[in-house]
Image (cartoon, rainbow, N blue to C red):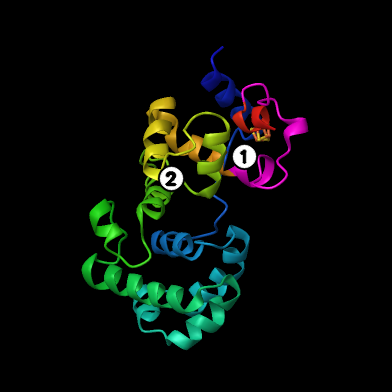
Amino acid sequence: MNNINKIEDYLDSLYPNPKCELNYNKDYELLIAIVLSAQATDKSVNLVTPKLFSKYPNLKLLKEANIDDIISIIRSIGTYNRKAFYVKEIARILDEECNGVVPTDRDLLESMPGVGRKVVNVFLSEFYHLPNIAVDTHVNRVSKRLGLAKEKDDVLKVERRLEKCFSKDNWAKRHLQLVLFGRYHCKSIRPNCDNCLLKDICKYKEKK
Ligand code: SF4
């Protein structure tokens, strides 16, 4: 069995049905939740979005919301001034330029404030089930530790390497599994190496 098969088997055994941990009910709620999750945990985002989306239950109300009120709702997740602006502006663009529907067009999505490649990849794979591998801090770290990418690779290079490692049908699932593996098992500090079945192929463990 090669290393990639070993990694896939282990991820499947740990996380057979991985799910996105952000809560949402509508397409734009997911997009905004992903934007809000930059430098914040999904858990902390899930604590503020119910209030935000129930107080402003559609795009028209959200784009016209008082920015200070949005700030007061999302303050606990940090970088709230910038994120409050993103929320209003994304709502405005979706309402006025996209018929109220989050598009699948990557260029259009990436033209929105706060929406970069990683946000688009997460959104497209989660909401539209389009094959994409988003490389966040967990995926980046874990991929390098497991030798799926090289230490010097930037996130786009890591994405390209992961696309080659895994079957396209599984890209969305592998992304979620690597996120969960990095979040709960192969943590940045004090990874759970003692209980890890990948230690024989792990570069990080080898170095230690
Ligand atoms: S051995 Fe440790 S560092 Fe390597 S993949 Fe497992 S948990 Fe992560």
**Can the viewer see residue 105?**
no
Three-letter amino acid code at the position of disc 2: Ala
| Ligand 1 placement by image quarter | top right
Relative to 5, is 102 on the left or the right? left
SS for dot 2: loop
- Of all residues shown, which one is farthest toward the top? 1
Q: Which residue is mark 1?
A: 181
Q: Which residue is mark 2?
A: 134
Residue 92 rendering spot, x and y as whole percentages:
30, 75
Q: Is label 1 within 8 A of ligand 1 (CB to nearest ligand atom)?
A: yes
| Residue 194 rendering spot, x and y as whole percentages | 77, 32
- The magenta-colored residue range is 180-201
Check residue 141 for magenta coloring: no
Between 107 and 207, the one lying in front of the other is 207
Placement of 35 over or under 4, stated as above or below? below
Is label 1 in a helix, a strand or a loop?
helix
